[in-house]
Structures are given as C-alpha cells and as structure tokens.
Image: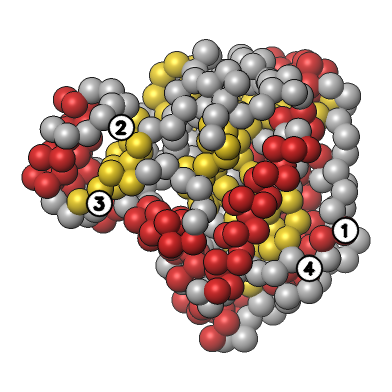
C-alpha cells in the first residue's frame, strides 16, 4: 500500500511514524511535511488548502490511500474532489466537515438531534447586534467565531468589556478573517475537559485511547490559550461507566444523526467534551485527529493503523482490531519564544540525537526545517516530545528527561503536563472548575 499523507505538523509526523510500522505499507509521501519528516519520508510541496492540486498529486503518485491531517482541506471539500476522481481518501465530505468548519452548523446539528451541549444564547450576524445582546447575558459567557480560526476563535469571559473587545476583533477588525462573520454566544460550562476521538466508516467505529490536553501556555493553566502544550493518556482518565455514558449519549447519537441526515462520513471524529455534573456535553466537534492528542494516542496504539484507515475509507472497518498498550503515554510540546503570539523562528535545535536515543521516547517534529548542519525552528510549536511508561509518572520522567537533552534558545514548555491527572474514580463534575471550553 502506498499512502499520501497531507499535512505538516506534529500530528502528521506521528501518523507517518505509526503508518510506517505496518508491514503492508510500501511507501509514504508527506505533503508538504516538515524538516523532521523529511529525514524518513519523501516530502512534496503542497498548499493544503488547494484540494484540486492535492487530487492531481494523488493521481500522479498512484496513491492507494490519502489521509488528511489538518482541517482546512476537509472543510474545503477535499473528500468530494477525490471521490469525483475515483481516488480513495480517508476523511468526511464537505458537508460533514462543517461540524468543525462552522460552530453554528454544529450547534444546530446537536440541537436537532438531542446531543448534549451547552445552551445557545444567540447567533449574531453583526457586531452591533452582538454588543446589544451583552446587556442581557449571564456571565461567564462563551463567544465563538463561527468558522475556522486556528484555535483562537473562542473566548470564555466574565467581563463585558472583554466580550465587547472580542466582538470588535472578530467582526469588525476581521482578525479571524471570514470566520468572524457570525458569532455564537453560549452558556459556559463547568467541569473537566476530555478529548474523545473515534475512527469510523460511518457505521462501525473504533474508540481511540482517551487523552487530556493542556491548552494554556504556562504552568498551572496560566497564560493564553494555545493549540495545545501537551497531552497525556492513561486508562484512568476514562472509567468504564463514564465511557459507556459518552458512547450512549454522544458518540452513537452523533453517528445515527449523520446517517439519518444522509451526511457521508468516514474518518476521525474528535469530540471535545466537558464532563459536567449533568453528564458529558459536547463543546465542539473536530473532523480529524487532534494535535497534540495524536502523539499520545499513537504511542499507545498496538494495532495496524494503516489497515484500519484503509478499511474505514472503504467502509469495511472492523472494531475488534483495536488494541492498546496498557501503559501511560505523554507528549510535551516545546514552543518557540513568543508563542502563541508572534513566535521567534530560525533558532538552531541542539540535542535531538541524545533525546531520541532514550528508551520509550519519540520526538515528533512540527515547526522545524532541515538544513545541512541540522534542524532550525520554523513555527510556533516546534517539537512534541513523547514517551511511554508503566505509569504516568514513569512516562513523565522519560519525556522530561528527553526534553532536558534538547536546547533551543528562548523556547518554552510546560513542566506540569500530566501532573493534575485525575484518580480513576473521579467522575464528572465532582471537582468542577471552569474549563476553557474550546478545542
């Protein structure tokens, strides 16, 4: 099997790394890939937003399967384009991808189909309407730009001034581009966040190992929201009764609703959940794997991901194949100085060979470029340093031991990834705190 993988981040590096472990995979192309991926795989330049060029590339390469990492090509209709050219791709249709591409579409979908989510306060097409509505809302309030905003289009606030400023940025200054044409107000939820991801062919599905993300830039959940500063995965995150509730109240109703509304879906569905005192509620859908959740998940995967992806794309997924290593995993993100604002790039990365030689460790590249004399920073999130261990504590020691080997001027990372892991018997809402309510 020859696979074309679209994307360039740490998520895609982890996917390629796991695909390469399949005995059935003959060739992997990464488009466009990154510096670290270029050491192991053939990287081909591609603007991921250009679905026509992506289809032409897959056709030229005679790829047996194309897997899409980021959300933009999915929202732009890459699955429809590939289908029109009889090319096999794992990913949802353009209509289905609106579950991620439009917060309003997703909210209406959940409301129509009785899927638990935060209460809607209003949807607004103009800044004036939105500001007028602020006079009557209860705080804390969640405001979401409707479209894709690279993880920056959500505000949770108890301040009317802050809410008004966000509306100005989104709708008048167009800081998020077309994503801010509409804004959604919803009630804030209290609880603990959980990432729950499945692979599906539209009927059958595999639940991936549970993960928890750390969104804030600095230790103790301080600082601005980011794309994710680290994740961990243990079986303790998800007690059996909570998993059953999520499956029965969220996952299965979502798949049933997609089928009922005749919305074609194959690929990954990321359920961003808040575990509230009233049970799990959906904060958001993503139509692809998360980053850096993927890095922690795939460190624990003990089955042929390539075959599972092919079977999902061809409507023949067998849920029984999924096997997971019992140990814990963790991924610590090393980020450039200035991230998530204006990251400083071009810094030399030292110590990678020493880090990669440590037992149980994998270093996944994101914002890097490769030159003759080594690697340099080329983005906000530089590396995801992942590790496994018999316990979460052992996985943390391994990952942070590897981080200590890597030197990047000005880089920062959180030192508390996985520290606040819940006990196995902690149920939704028992230790509620206001969550960030974004993904």
Which badge, 2 or 4, is on the more N-terminal residue? 2
Label 3 vs label 2: CA separation? 13 Å
Circle 1 sits on which residue?
Answer: 321
Which badge, 3 or 1, is on the more N-terminal residue? 3
Q: Secondary structure at mark 4?
A: loop
Its colouring scheme is secondary structure
Residue 317, numbered circle:
4
Which badge, 2 or 1, is on the more N-terminal residue? 2
For the residue pair 302 and 340, the one nearer the viewer reads as 302
Q: Residue at x 77, y 28 (%)?
A: 236
**Left or right: where 302 falls relative to 238:** right
Between label 2 and label 1, give the one nearer the viewer.
2
Between label 2 and label 4, give the one nearer the viewer.
2
Question: Contact, CB < 8 Å: mark 2 with mark 1?
Answer: no
Residue 58, given in percent of the width and then of the height, sits at: 62, 75
**Left or right: where 230 falls relative to 134:** right
Question: Contact, CB < 8 Å: mark 2 with mark 4?
Answer: no
Assess disc 1: are there few (<14), some (14-19) or many (≥20) residues with their C-alpha within 10 Å of its C-alpha.
some
Residue 320, given in percent of the width and then of the height, sits at: 87, 59
Circle 3 sits on which residue?
Answer: 123
For the residue pair 278 and 79, the one nearer the viewer reads as 278
Label 4 vs label 3: CA separation? 38 Å
Q: Residue at x 38, y 59 (%)?
A: 108
**Left or right: where 24 falls relative to 119:** right
Between label 3 and label 1, give the one nearer the viewer.
3
Label 4 vs label 1: CA separation? 9 Å
Q: Residue at x 49, y 61 (%)?
A: 113
Vertical relation: 189 (above or below) 302: above
Which badge, 3 or 2, is on the more N-terminal residue? 3
Determine the image quadrant of residue 61. bottom right
**Left or right: where 340 falls relative to 394:** left
């Amino acid at each position: 099997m020859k696979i074309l993988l679209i994307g360039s981040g740490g998520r895609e590096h982890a996917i390629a790394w796991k695909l390469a472990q399949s005995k059935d995979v003959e060739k992997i192309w990464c488009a466009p890939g990154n510096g670290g991926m270029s050491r192991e795989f053939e990287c081909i330049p591609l603007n991921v937003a250009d679905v026509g060029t992506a289809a032409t590339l897959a056709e030229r390469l005679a790829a047996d399967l194309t897997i899409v990492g980021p959300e933009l090509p999915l929202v732009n209709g890459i699955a429809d384009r590939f289908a029109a050219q009889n090319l096999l791709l794992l990913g949802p249709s353009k209509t289905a991808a609106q579950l991620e591409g439009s917060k309003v579409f997703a909210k209406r979908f959940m409301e129509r189909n009785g899927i638990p989510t935060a209460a809607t306060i209003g949807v607004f097409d103009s800044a004036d309407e939105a500001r007028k509505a602020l006079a009557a809302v209860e705080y804390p309030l969640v405001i979401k730009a409707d479209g894709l905003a690279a993880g920056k289009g959500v505000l949770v606030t108890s301040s009317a001034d802050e809410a008004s400023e966000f509306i100005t940025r989104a709708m008048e200054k167009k800081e998020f581009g077309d994503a801010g044409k509409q804004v959604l107000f919803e009630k804030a939820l209290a609880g603990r966040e959980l990432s729950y991801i499945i692979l599906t062919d539209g009927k059958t599905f595999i639940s991936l190992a549970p993960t928890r993300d750390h969104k804030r830039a600095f230790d103790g959940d301080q600082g601005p929201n980011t794309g994710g500063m680290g994740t961990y995965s243990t079986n303790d995150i998800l007690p059996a009764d909570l998993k059953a509730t999520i499956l029965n109240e969220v996952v299965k109703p979502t798949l049933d609703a997609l089928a009922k509304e005749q919305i074609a879906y194959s690929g990954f569905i990321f359920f961003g959940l808040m575990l509230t005192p009233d049970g799990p509620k959906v904060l958001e859908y993503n139509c692809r794997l998360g980053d850096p959740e993927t890095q922690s998940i795939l460190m624990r995967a003990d089955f042929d991901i390539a075959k599972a992806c092919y079977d999902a794309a061809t409507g023949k997924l067998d849920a029984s194949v999924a096997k997971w290593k019992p140990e814990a995993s963790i991924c610590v993100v090393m980020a450039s100085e200035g991230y998530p604002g204006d990251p400083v790039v071009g810094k030399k990365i030292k110590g990678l060979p020493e880090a990669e030689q440590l037992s149980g460790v994998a270093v996944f590249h994101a914002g890097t470029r490769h030159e003759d004399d080594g690697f340099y920073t080329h983005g906000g999130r530089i590396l995801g340093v992942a590790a496994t261990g018999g316990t979460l504590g052992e996985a943390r020691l391994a990952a942070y031991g590897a981080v200590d080997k890597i030197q990047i001027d000005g880089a920062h990372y959180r030192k508390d990834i996985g520290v606040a892991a819940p006990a196995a018997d902690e149920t939704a809402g028992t230790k509620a705190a206001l969550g960030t309510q974004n993904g």
